[in-house]
Amino acid sequence: MRIVKGALLAIAVVTTAAAQAPEIPLTDTRLTVHTLLREDIFAGFMDNDTERMARGEQNLEQLLQLRPEQRAPLLAWKAGIAMQRAVRAHETGKPEDFTRYFKDARDTFASARQLASGNDGVVPIIGGTYAVFADRLPKEHRVDAWTEAYGAYSMLWKSQGANIEQMPLHFKGEVLGGMAQAAQRTGRTEESAQFVDRMLTSLAGTPYEKVARRWKDDPSSVATTNLTCKNCHSAGRLSARITAVNK
């Protein structure tokens, strides 16, 4: 149960749709670093909103000073930003920039792992970041990226698999979907099929079931579809959280 708190918090974070963020109270310790950063960073991840991404990065740097005890998850977020920039550099034909950002992302993830306590959300940030971006990397890096994702999701599964049915829908869907897709992308087809079947039963009636059914019925869709990020939170979660803690 050691990583459940961070996992429940951050596995949703790395698949959350971006929203217009309010003024962000970085000094309010009632708000986690994940809550404070996710909307701006995901505006960059999902919508390529460079202005919001820059604001998220600026807030991250301030949080590194304000909350040194949260350095591990903050470095994981920092690595995610570098990975997004690496992917964008690749997609816009800038190989030198790609190489620089990709190395930075991997090195910073490694630093986050070294500092991680096990319950700070580092593992799900790593797994979720690779799940978002691995298929968009140059082909020669995709297997290694999915191997990283598989390792992260496997850690979550080992820790929480026995209790997965009691977990919130988003966490359950992301872990099962992440395991299924990372297993498939790394050649573990039998294991992937088992997790797809588990999605069909455990996630019946949800968007996760719909895409899992497509994987089951149409194998040709597997290479071009994603099993994660199917139950993203509605916009304005930071605003709602700020309102809640101020009541």
Image: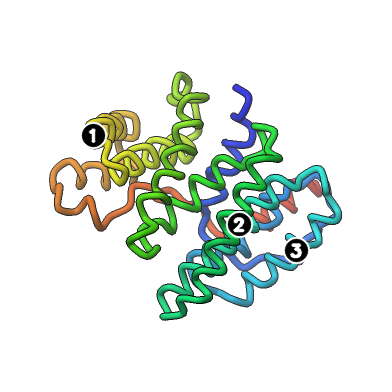
Distance from disc 2 to disc 3, alpha carbons, whole Å, reads 15 Å
Say if mark 1 contacts mark 3, CB within 8 Å: no
Mark 1 surroundings within 10 Å by alpha-carbon count, few (fewer than 14), some (14 through 19), many (20 or more): some
Please give the name of the residue rendered at 76% of the width and 66% of the height, measured from the top-left corner.
Answer: 23
Label 1 sits on residue: 193
Q: Which residue is mark 3?
A: 59
Q: Is residue 103 left or right of residue 164?
A: right
Q: Can you say whether 15 is above or below 182 in the image?
A: below
Q: Nearer the viewer, residue 76 or 215?
A: 76
* Badge number at residue 79: 2
The nearer-to-camera label among 1 and 2 is 2
Q: Position of residue 175 (x, y in %)?
A: 43, 37
Rendered image: mark on residue 100: none
Left or right? Give the position of 58 relative to 225.
Answer: right
Residue plotted at (50% across, 34% down): 168
Given residues 158 and 247, the one toward you in this image is: 158
Mark before the other along the chain sequence, 1 or 2: 2
